[in-house]
Image (tube, rainbow, N blue to C red):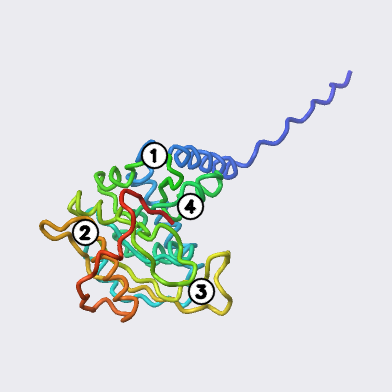
Amino acid sequence: MSALPMESAPPEPARPARAASAARNAAGRVVDKAGDGILQYTSGIWRFGRVLAQKGPLNAVVHGMTKIDVVGRENLKKVRGPFVIAPNHNSHLDTAVLHAIMPWQHAGKVATAAAGDTFYTKRIVRVLTAMFFNTYPVDRTGNRRRAGLSARLVDAGVPLLIFAEGTRSRDGSIGRFKPGVAALCVTRRIPCVPVALIGFHEAMPVGQNWPTRGRPPVKVVIGKPMRPRNGERIREFNDRIRAQVVAMYQARTPDVVVARPTSATSGPRGQEEAS
């Protein structure tokens, strides 16, 4: 009597595919909990992954799509401990370029404030922005559930990238700075690194999802770290940060002497800033 043929079992997924799926799921679980914990921002393993993403594909894409000129990189190289990078904001390209040109000692370590209502509504967006930009959510709708995450990260030694205007410029001009950056620096006694981003509005204005063809030129001017002076109030330091960014933007160099700013440049109090 002949044996009955046995039904063949369905093939198992390839091991690399299973591993990749598990990694994506793990990343998703960590990112889903952003704002409830800070492991994503302090873990050496997660930082290693971000360094690979930022210095590999991200660096290749932004240099392939734009011509990047960086001035004052040494000012960022020499700063230590937690600090806040405070650039003007024109485009989603801003964040990508800043992380791509980040000095090695800070690569993968800097956490970026991102609008929760824009970057944390879809899981795939949350995962990708966390992978490449180490984002954390900032609420702009009035719900303060996650308020104070910037301070928690600074207290854990994590440097931050915060766009103090709170949103992208629609015409390329530098708007008012909200006082969140200055408040962090004054209350935590940490330095602020002012950065002027030039040409980013022309390269990728609001409403455009990809840089303009032809590798448009962009320039990153990194200023010397600024520290709050003894007795300096939050509003005063906020005005001084903005004045330095404006001066560097106009002179296209970090080596500028800033005139005494006026209080008219500051914005409403008590708000965190996001991309």
- For this view, does 55 lie left or right of residue 84? right
Q: Which residue is mark 3?
A: 203
Q: Identify the residue shown where x is 45% and y is 72%.
A: 172
Q: Which residue is mark 2?
A: 191
How far is disc 4 from disc 1 in space, using C-alphas? 22 Å
- The picture quadrant where one finds residue 190 is bottom left
Q: Which residue is mark 4?
A: 129
Q: Is residue 133 above or below residue 24?
A: below
Instruction: Name the amino acid type tagged 3.
Output: Ala
How far is disc 3 from disc 1 in space, using C-alphas? 34 Å
Image coordinates for residue 108, horizontal then vertical, percent: 37, 55
Q: Which residue is mark 1?
A: 144
Element type where label 1 sits in the image: loop
Q: Is residue 2 above or below residue 41?
A: above
Kindly identify which numbered label has been placed on residue 256: none
Number of the front mark, 3 or 4 = 3
- Of residues 2 and 187, the one nearer the viewer is 187
- Cβ–Cβ below 8 Å for labels 3 and 2? no
Q: Identify the residue shown where x is 20% and y is 53%.
A: 186
Q: Outermost residue toward the bottom?
A: 251
